[in-house]
Image (spheres, rainbow, N blue to C red):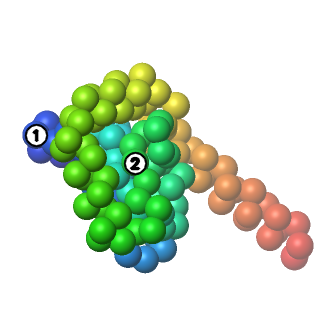
């Protein structure tokens, strides 16, 4: 259902005003092939990389966001170019949930084992 809802969008905006650990909404955009405009806040910059997956609003201000949007409105070809980059690198950007879940299980197994060894 989310996949269909995102069909109408060309760019995703993640205008967080506080430090987010990761900000999953941007990852959903990238999974769909939608480049992201993201504020330089917390983990958002782990996946919103200038020139690779989108555009970074360095000062995280409204004026900075408006400047990026205005630049893209004046030159929409940048959006298509970034979309193509995201699609081309999607396999390395987005990990399947099953891989992530297995990695998390491994981390918890290691923590449990380390804790048991201390006792």
Q: 74 and 94: which one is in front?
A: 74
Residue 30 against residue 46 in the figure, above or below: above
Give the mark, 1 or 2, whose residue is nearer the N terminus: 1
Q: Name the residue located 30 percent from the left edge and 33 percent from the top edge.
A: 78
Q: From the viewer's perspective, is the residue at label 1 or at label 2 nearer?
A: 2
**Mark 1 near mark 2, Cβ–Cβ under 8 Å?**
no
For label 2, count other residues whose C-alpha is less than 10 Å away and answer few (under 14), some (14-19) or many (20+): many
Q: Position of residue 38 (x, y in %)?
A: 38, 57
Q: Which residue position is annotated with label 1? A: 8
Quarter of the rendering occupied by the N terminus: top left
Residue 95 against residue 64 in the figure, above or below: above
For label 1, count other residues whose C-alpha is less than 10 Å away and answer few (under 14), some (14-19) or many (20+): few
Q: Name the residue located 40 percent from the left edge and 27 percent from the top edge.
A: 85
Q: Name the residue located 67 percent from the left edge and 55 percent from the top edge.
A: 107
Left or right position of 103 against 52: right
Q: Position of residue 92 (x, y in %)?
A: 52, 31
Q: Which residue position is annotated with label 2? A: 55
Snapshot quadrant of residue 72: top left
| Separation (CA) of disc 1 from disc 2 | 20 Å
Mark on residue 53?
Answer: none
What element does badge 1 sit on? helix
Left or right position of 30 against 102: left
Residue 87 against residue 23 in the figure, above or below: above
Q: Is residue 23 visible?
A: no
Q: 7 and 103: which one is in front?
A: 7
């Amino acid at each position: 259902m989310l996949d269909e809802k995102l069909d109408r969008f060309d760019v995703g905006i993640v205008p967080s005003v506080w430090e987010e650990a990761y900000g999953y909404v941007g990852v959903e955009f990238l999974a769909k092939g939608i480049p992201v405009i993201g504020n330089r806040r917390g983990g958002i910059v782990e996946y919103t990389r200038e020139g690779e997956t989108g555009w970074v609003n360095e000062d995280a201000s409204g004026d900075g966001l408006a400047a990026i949007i205005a630049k893209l409105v004046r030159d929409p070809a940048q959006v298509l170019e970034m979309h193509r980059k995201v699609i081309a690198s999607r396999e390395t950007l987005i990990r399947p949930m099953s891989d992530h879940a297995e990695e998390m299980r491994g981390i918890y197994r290691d923590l449990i084992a380390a804790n048991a060894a201390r006792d």
